[in-house]
Image (cartoon, rainbow, N blue to C red):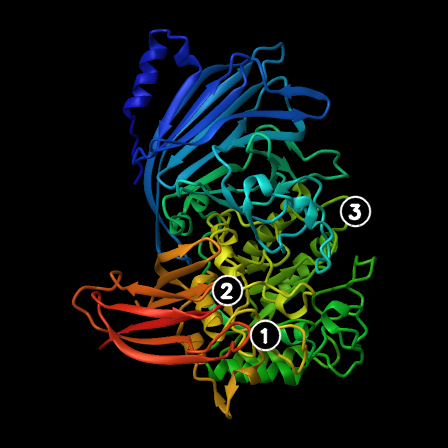
């Protein structure tokens, strides 16, 4: 249901304009529906647009100006005049086909100010604000006009001027990769340039002291802010350049050396939404649906070909060095393989795939991913990577049809793998054939990859050219009824609402860094930070579930920097509609039987009716409860950083008058992420809405709870 409302402040503006007040022609305000957030828009004396943001009585964003620079055209900055404006309000509810919750309320007040440049060309620009209870979004809208047909943007100058030296959780504004450890510093201490040329990253380019989004902050007054963008379509990804002196940020678009600018566009066009999420508690940021709501509704119809699931795969064994992606064992992947050579350790063999299928079928796991099944892995990291993979030809020791039939007979769905080696033109030439091959073999989802520097040279993973490639993949797979899990992707910006075949993506420093990074892997604080930063953008294919924490038989100098209970909790904390049990099948065995803690992975849901953030602080800890859609069962996960803590849980989210059977998987008394990571305990008890529990979390530890209603 949609309704139109005009609030008192808007009515006041209309009255002032009607009587010809000069101030009313340049100054506008719009509130959130609950009136807690106020956006003010105005023009300076020179005719330059700017805005401010208040939360209750607090100024959150100080005077922040807006302008554009173009190639071979004068800037669009000053001498602008308001020619008209529109106001409105929407309150509707839409249903997620899969997601963190079933229904999403989309409730906002909006203001669009239409501007005209006072020049001979009379260039037109509209600035469109939507103000929600959980934050704001605004974008630039360039309408069709007589004197402007096409532009090459060299800079979009959107300022975000802060009101204090906030605490910030950030990664550098890398044009190629998001796979950095998050830093926690004061805003004045951000130094992104020092993160250039990371030894464990295949491609990095950080040209400015800028941060990637989402970037999350906490003010001294305890207010939480997160800056990002929504609906990134046919535009360059946005980083935020840091201005230490003025405690501000300005949009810095990812460029293209081939283009000679940032984004080339034909009018009319809209930019992505620039977003600021605002919360009084850290958990408010996770519960916010601002990014999703700023995207268009579903454009592709039903996605019943995709079923949220858990999966296993021939993947982790390559990272820890048990096996190789290529059949010959000749790939130059010393970071992964520590210089080992030989052709007898190919992972994607027919028999190995069957082993994983057997394990999946016996333990309620519905999917299997096989990496390294197709030819080309012996050449994929060479400089000439065009035409390396064809996505349809298996290695000689992998009988594709036999594995396909065996999986089908055991009720396990194959997940296709398309590693493009960052040669998207090769991929685009083969999309039609590759997707037809998938459908002919009953395969409905694909994991894509883009490892390496982008070909053609001069383009970057996060630039406009690649944004359009990633979008093309979604469009073409939607036509074929295929779901996509993208790795080395463009950032998530809520496009899963419009294209719900975009089921998950990587876009962060994943689990594999624990297996081969030379800097010690992901610290215990990594995922308690990710939950409040990267996860705000959308679902994450993090690949949790390592039980053999040290894996010393393969790599003595690497390990997972969490406890086993922490790994279990990730199935609830880090959201994805597909969740991998990433460890080797033999590592899920204990004394000849399935590990008792694996029962939680078997039981936990992946598709949710509702989500509640029970507690948390960015980078320290987080506790999330989610209710499964079909069963109505609840699952709770909690993780902490290197600091052990005791967390008190209450269960107000449970139904009145009902009793539940709870199974708690928690750290053992002497558990520690490094000294004793696999120590765990399992406890069974009954819970009601009135129950309260004190649960200890070890250093780097966690807990997971399944809550099943008694029959």
Tag 2–tag 3 contact (CB < 8 Å): no
Of residues 568 and 108, the one drawn nearer to the viewer in this rendering: 568
- From the image, tell me which residue sits under label 2: 642
Which class describes the residues within 10 Å of circle 1: few (<14), some (14-19), or many (20+)?
many
Q: Earlier in the sequence, mark 1 or mark 3?
A: 1
Which class describes the residues within 10 Å of circle 3: few (<14), some (14-19), or many (20+)?
few
Spot occupied by residue 41 in the image (x, y as percentages of width and height)? 44, 23
In this picture, residue 389 sits left or right of residue 226 = right
Question: Disc 2 on helix, strand or loop?
Answer: loop
Of residues 357 and 110, the one drawn nearer to the viewer in this rendering: 110
Write down the quadrant of residue 706 in the picture. Answer: bottom left
Write down the quadrant of residue 1 in the picture. Answer: top left
Q: Which mark is residue 457?
A: 3
The extreme bottom residue here reads: 592
Of residues 299 and 491, the one drawn nearer to the viewer in this rendering: 491
Residue at horizontal 67%, vertical 57%? Answer: 431
Can you see residue 5?
yes
Distance in Å between CA atoms under marks 2 and 3:
42 Å
Which class describes the residues within 10 Å of circle 2: few (<14), some (14-19), or many (20+)?
many
Spot occupied by residue 209 in the image (x, y as percentages of width and height)? 66, 40
Question: Disc 1 on helix, strand or loop?
Answer: strand
Residue at horizontal 52%, vertical 31%? Answer: 161
Q: Earlier in the sequence, mark 2 or mark 3?
A: 3
Of residues 317 and 354, the one drawn nearer to the viewer in this rendering: 317
Q: Which mark is residue 313?
A: 1
Nearer the observer, disc 2 or disc 1?
2
């Amino acid at each position: 249901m949609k309704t139109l409302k005009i609030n008192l402040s808007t009515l006041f503006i209309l009255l002032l304009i009607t009587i010809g007040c000069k101030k009313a022609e340049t100054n506008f305000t719009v509130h959130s529906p609950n009136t807690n957030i106020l956006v003010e828009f105005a023009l300076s004396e020179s005719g330059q647009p700017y805005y401010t943001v208040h939360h209750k009585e607090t100024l959150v964003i100080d005077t922040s100006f807006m302008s554009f620079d173009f190639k071979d055209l004068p800037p669009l900055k000053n001498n602008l005049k308001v020619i008209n404006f529109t106001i409105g309000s929407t309150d509707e509810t839409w249903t997620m086909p899969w997601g963190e919750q079933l229904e999403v309320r989309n409730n906002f007040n909006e203001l669009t100010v239409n501007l005209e440049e006072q020049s001979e060309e009379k260039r037109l620009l509209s600035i469109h604000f939507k103000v929600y209870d959980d934050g704001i979004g605004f974008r630039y809208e360039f309408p069709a006009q007589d004197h402007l047909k096409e532009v090459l943007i060299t800079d979009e100058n959107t300022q975000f001027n802060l009101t204090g030296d906030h605490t910030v959780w950030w990664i550098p504004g890398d044009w190629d990769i998001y796979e950095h450890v998050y830093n926690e510093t004061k805003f004045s201490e951000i130094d992104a340039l020092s993160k250039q040329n990371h030894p464990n990253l295949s491609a990095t380019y950080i040209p400015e002291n800028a941060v990637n989004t989402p970037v999350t902050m906490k003010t001294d007054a305890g207010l939480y802010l997160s800056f990002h963008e929504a609906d990134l379509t046919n535009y360059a990804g946005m980083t935020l350049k840091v201005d230490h002196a003025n405690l501000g940020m300005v949009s810095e678009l990812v460029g293209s050396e081939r283009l000679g600018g940032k984004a080339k566009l034909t009018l009319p066009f809209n930019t992505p939404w620039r977003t600021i999420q605002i919360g009084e508690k850290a958990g408010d940021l996770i519960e916010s649906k601002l990014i999703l709501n700023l995207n268009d509704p579903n454009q592709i119809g039903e996605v019943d070909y995709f079923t949220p699931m858990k999966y296993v795969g021939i993947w982790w064994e390559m990272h820890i060095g048990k096996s190789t992606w290529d059949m010959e064992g000749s790939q130059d992947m010393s970071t992964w393989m520590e210089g080992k050579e030989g052709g007898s350790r190919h992972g994607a063999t027919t028999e190995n795939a069957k082993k994983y299928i057997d394990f999946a079928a016996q333990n309620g796991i519905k999917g299997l991913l096989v990496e390294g099944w197709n030819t080309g892995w012996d050449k994929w990291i060479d400089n000439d990577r065009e035409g390396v993979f064809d996505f349809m030809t298996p290695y000689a020791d992998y009988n594709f049809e036999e594995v396909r039939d065996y999986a089908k007979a055991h009720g396990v769905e194959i997940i296709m793998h398309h590693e493009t080696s960052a040669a998207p033109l090769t991929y685009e030439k083969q999309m039609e054939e590759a997707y037809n091959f998938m459908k002919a073999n009953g395969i409905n989802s694909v994991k894509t990859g883009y490892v390496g520097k982008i070909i053609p040279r001069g383009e970057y993973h996060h630039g406009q050219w690649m944004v359009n490639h990633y979008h093309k993949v979604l469009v073409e797979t939607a036509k074929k009824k295929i779901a996509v899990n993208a790795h080395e992707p463009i950032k998530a910006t809520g496009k899963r609402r419009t294209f719900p075949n975009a089921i998950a993506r990587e876009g962060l420093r994943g689990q594999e860094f624990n297996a081969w990074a030379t800097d010690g892997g992901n610290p215990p604080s990594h995922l308690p930070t990710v939950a409040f930063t990267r996860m705000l953008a959308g679902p994450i294919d993090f690949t949790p579930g390592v039980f053999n924490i040290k894996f010393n038989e393969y790599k003595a100098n690497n390990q997972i920097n969490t406890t086993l209970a922490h790994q279990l909790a990730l199935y609830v904390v880090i959201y994805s509609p597909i969740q991998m049990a990433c460890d080797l099948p033999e590592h899920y065995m204990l004394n000849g039987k399935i590990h008792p803690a694996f029962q939680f992975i078997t039981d936990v849901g992946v598709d949710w009716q509702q989500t509640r953030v029970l507690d948390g602080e960015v980078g320290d800890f987080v506790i999330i409860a989610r209710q499964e859609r079909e069963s109505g069962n609840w699952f709770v996960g909690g993780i902490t950083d290197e600091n052990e803590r005791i967390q008190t849980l209450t269960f107000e989210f449970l139904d009145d008058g009902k009793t539940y059977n709870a199974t708690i998987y928690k750290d053992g008394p002497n558990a520690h992420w490094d000294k004793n990571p696999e120590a765990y305990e399992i406890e069974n008890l009954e819970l009601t809405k009135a129950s309260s529990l004190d649960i200890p979390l070890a250093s780097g530890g966690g807990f997971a709870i399944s809550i099943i209603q008694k029959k």
